Image: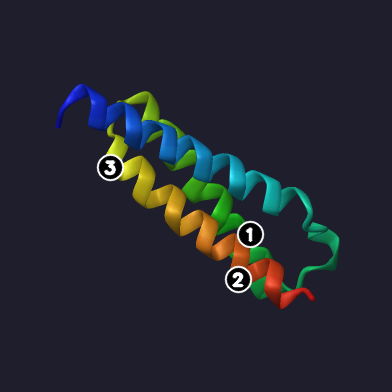
Amino acid sequence: MSGTEEMRLTREARGRIEDTEKVVSRIDPGRLARAQQETLATIEDFLAKARAALTARDVQRALTLADKALALAHDLSRSLR
């Protein structure tokens, strides 16, 4: 992968991590049912792994994990409306 491509993917992964954090910050963990709490824990796990992958410069893995975290966060947020 070229340096330019790696930089682009890194920006995308960071953006998705930030987007996920914004969605999660609006969720009140105290209002969650048990299954929803497990989903939130999975989101947080994906975020931690995405950050670790970025640190290791495994940008493709970071992007995949960030995408999964964001999708789950949106699903969880929608289920609370």
Separation of marks 3 and 2 at Cα, in angstroms = 23 Å
Mark 1: which amino acid? Leu
Q: Residue at the location (69% across, 52% down)?
A: 24
Badge 3 vs badge 2, beta-carbon distance below 8 Å: no
Residue 39, picture quadrant: bottom right
Q: Residue at the location (60% across, 56% down)?
A: 41
Residue bearing the label numbered 1 = 40
Residue 36, picture quadrant: bottom right
Crowding near the residue tagged with mark 3, few <14, some 14–19, many ≥20 C-alpha atoms within 10 Å:
some
Badge 1 vs badge 2, beta-carbon distance below 8 Å: no
Label 3 secondary element: helix
Provide residue 54's location: percent of width, then percent of height.
38, 30
Separation of marks 1 and 3 at Cα, in angstroms = 23 Å
> Seen in the image, is 76 located left or right of residue 10?
right
Q: Is residue 27 above or below residue 35?
A: above
> Seen in the image, is 23 located left or right of residue 3?
right
Crowding near the residue tagged with mark 2, few <14, some 14–19, many ≥20 C-alpha atoms within 10 Å:
few
Q: Residue at the location (60% across, 46% down)?
A: 19
Label 1 secondary element: helix
Separation of marks 1 and 2 at Cα, in angstroms = 10 Å
Pick the residue in front: 34 or 70: 70
Residue bearing the label numbered 2 = 75
Q: Is residue 43 above or below residue 10?
A: below
Pick the residue in front: 29 or 57: 57
Label 2 secondary element: helix
Q: Residue at the location (64% across, 45% down)?
A: 21
Residue bearing the label numbered 3 = 60
Task: Work out whether mark 1 precedes mark 3 in sequence or the reverse, and give the earlier one.
Answer: 1
Task: Work out whether mark 3 precedes mark 2 in sequence or the reverse, and give the earlier one.
Answer: 3
Task: Work out whether mark 1 precedes mark 2 in sequence or the reverse, and give the earlier one.
Answer: 1
Mark 3: which amino acid? Gln
Q: Is residue 50 above or below residue 40?
A: above
